[in-house]
Image (tube, coloured by chain):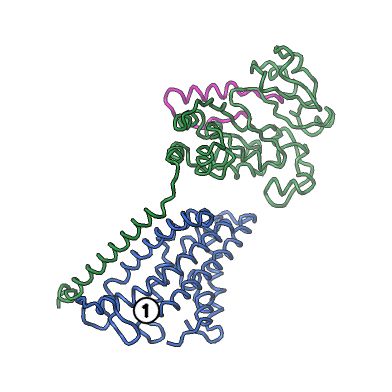
């Protein structure tokens, strides 16, 4: 008996049954689509289209869809998407019929230079390889109570693979081309040494230690000793860098990124990111390559 | 046809757990168990779809695919439709394909209804609902419900099939929750480098399956 003879009696009714099922389901779904349709603002879908769909949460909402909903309902501003940056803000503004001022691009900066070479340990920590766990144990093993513990909790938390743990220095490093300033790393760091700062400001104080100079020198070669030299050389009227609480701080509003304080700092705890970011910009501008720029340690 | 509710429940949840004993639905078992909240969401969605899909497919099986027997009537034969003669009717040619059709359409339908009438549940189930369309555990429970069950060729009656689907879903939720608990602990511990990630998850899955084999013949129930 051939296959066709075996199948013969079934074929007629088989395709009829399947066809009928398909028609019934099609009809039911079509009716459901009509009667159970939920009216969604068409702009919401358009906004979802232009968002990066990484669901990073940097805007403060649960994901790109939630943010799009909030924008359409007028609850959120159109320029909150950090990964999308100015481009996305303008596109959303067009959809919503608004003029949008683009948010200034930002980037995460690691504000500690307590590398293996510059600092030491108070005790040998043999627990969970996680900064938060280490902090729970006598504030961590690092000699500096304010400094990086180097277990890379921030590196693992980064949703964009924009951080690496430098094996030579033991410090995390931000790959600035990939960083979208979502702030996840800053949130998980138990020592609060990562901050999301404007990308157009090149001068940052790479130290968090608020102890007096003597205590700082005992634990770190590159910690801020609050000598006020930066205050003296700052050309900005009224000064863009001030020492308060034994720690220098740059005012992001008034700093002109001239780099004089970074040059003069006797312990080299003020970092100048000008060269790094200029080069990254130059490299990315003509060809549009996306090689990660690396922060000088 | 003396299958009791208790027997079905213990059988589907513990003795022949769909994930750990029948090895169905392993994709979400490893894919969605990184966080407990995710796996509970997925498990609830699966319970929901399995119950409904079991009921609909059992009805389809008894009233469209199988020829009329004293237990149930075939609608096609009843209205004088040319139905192939033979003991198993259209079962062998149409079962799998029509069940897939039913499950896919059902999930679509449920999604639309939920979105309109229970938006909170819709948001809670989220992405998992459409994903279940292609979950083999759902098709598996539909097929097993309608195979020979204790000598009866017509499978489980519709209400028992729905109950069995519900219990299979509970079993799935149980396996997912246990696994996600284990994996949340694993993420915090130091695993040898070669075993990090999926390999250690596979080892855990295997050990859990071994543990569940201990339920075989529990209370003398063989399912």
Q: Where does the magenta region start and end?
A: A268-297
Horizontal relation, residue A139 to residue A163: left or right: right
Q: Is residue A234 above or below residue A205?
A: above
Residue A230 lies in the magenta-colored region: no
Chain assignment, label 1: B
Q: Which residue position holds label 1? A: B147
Q: Is residue A286 magenta?
A: yes
Left or right of A289 in this view: A229 = right
The quarter holding residue A32 reads bottom left
Q: Nearer the viewer, residue A283 or A33?
A: A33
Q: Residue furthest front?
A: A35
Image point (54%, 64%), residue name: B176
Q: Residue at x 39, y 68 (%)?
A: B139
Chain A: give its colour. green
- The local crowd at label 1, few if under 14, some if 14 to 19, many if 20 or more residues have their Cα within 10 Å, is some
Measured as percent of width and height from the top left, residue A180 is found at: 55, 34
**Can residue A99 be spotted in the picture?**
yes
> Which quadrant of the structure image shows residue A171?
top right
Front residue of A21 and A154: A21
The spot of residue A227 in percent (x, y) is 80, 21
The image shows residue A7, relative to residue B183, as above or below, that is below
Which residue is painted at 55% across and 57% down in the image? Answer: B38
Q: Which chain is blue?
A: B
Q: Quadrant of the N terminus of chain B?
A: bottom left
Residue B43 position within the rendered picture, expressed as x and y whole percent measured from the top left: 52, 63
Q: Is residue B130 visible?
A: no
Disc 1 on helix, strand or loop?
loop
Question: Is B63 placed above or below A189 here?
Answer: below
């Amino acid at each position: 008996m051939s296959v066709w003879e075996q199948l013969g009696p079934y074929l007629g009714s088989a395709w009829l049954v399947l066809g009928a099922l398909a028609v019934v389901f099609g009809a039911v779904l079509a009716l459901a689509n009509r009667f159970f349709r939920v009216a969604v603002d068409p702009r919401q879908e358009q906004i979802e289209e232009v968002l990066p769909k990484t669901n990073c949460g940097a805007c403060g909402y649960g994901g790109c869809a939630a943010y799009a909903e909030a924008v359409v309902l007028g609850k959120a501003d159109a320029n909150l998407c950090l990964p999308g940056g100015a481009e996305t803000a303008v596109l959303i503004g067009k959809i919503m019929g608004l003029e949008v001022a683009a948010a200034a691009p930002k980037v995460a900066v690691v504000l500690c230079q307590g590398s293996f070479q510059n600092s030491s340990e108070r005790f040998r920590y043999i627990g969970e390889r996680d900064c938060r766990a280490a902090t729970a144990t006598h504030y961590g093993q690092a000699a500096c109570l304010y400094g990086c513990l180097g277990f890379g909790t921030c590196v693992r938390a980064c949703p964009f693979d924009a951080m690496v743990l430098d094996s030579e220095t033991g410090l995390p490093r931000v790959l600035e081309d990939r960083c979208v300033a979502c702030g996840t790393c800053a949130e998980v760091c138990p020592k609060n040494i990562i901050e999301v700062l404007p990308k157009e400001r090149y001068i940052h104080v790479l130290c968090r230690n608020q102890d007096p100079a003597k205590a700082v020198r005992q634990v770190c070669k590159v910690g801020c000793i609050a000598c006020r030299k930066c205050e003296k050389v700052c050309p900005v009227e009224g000064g863009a860098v001030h020492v308060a609480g034994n720690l220098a701080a740059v005012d992001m509003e008034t700093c002109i990124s001239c780099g004089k304080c970074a040059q003069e700092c006797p312990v080299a705890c003020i970092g100048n990111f000008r060269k790094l970011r200029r080069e990254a910009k130059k490299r990315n501008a003509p060809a549009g390559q996306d090689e990660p720029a690396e922060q000088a340690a | 046809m003396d299958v009791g509710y208790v027997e079905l429940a213990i059988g589907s949840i513990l003795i022949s757990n769909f994930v750990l004993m029948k090895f169905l639905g392993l994709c979400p078992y490893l894919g969605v168990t990184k966080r407990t909240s995710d796996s509970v969401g997925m498990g609830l969605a699966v319970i929901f779809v399995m119950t409904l899909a079991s009921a609909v497919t059992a009805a389809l099986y008894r009233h469209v695919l199988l020829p009329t027997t004293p237990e149930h009537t075939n609608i096609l034969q009843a209205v004088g439709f040319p139905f192939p003669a033979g003991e198993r009717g259209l079962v062998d040619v149409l079962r799998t394909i029509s069940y897939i059709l039913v499950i896919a359409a059902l999930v679509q339908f449920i999604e639309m209804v939920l979105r309109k009438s229970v938006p909170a549940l819709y948001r809670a189930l989220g992405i998992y609902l459409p994903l279940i369309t292609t979950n083999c555990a759902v098709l598996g429970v539909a097929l097993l419900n309608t195979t020979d069950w204790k000598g009866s060729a017509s499978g489980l009656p519709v209400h028992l099939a729905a109950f069995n689907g519900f219990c299979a879903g509970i079993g799935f939720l149980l396996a997912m929750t246990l696994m996600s608990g284990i994996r949340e602990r694993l993420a915090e511990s130091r695993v040898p480098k070669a075993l990090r990630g999926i390999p250690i998850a596979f080892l855990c899955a295997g050990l859990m399956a071994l543990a569940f084999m201990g339920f075989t013949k529990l209370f003398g129930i063989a399912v």
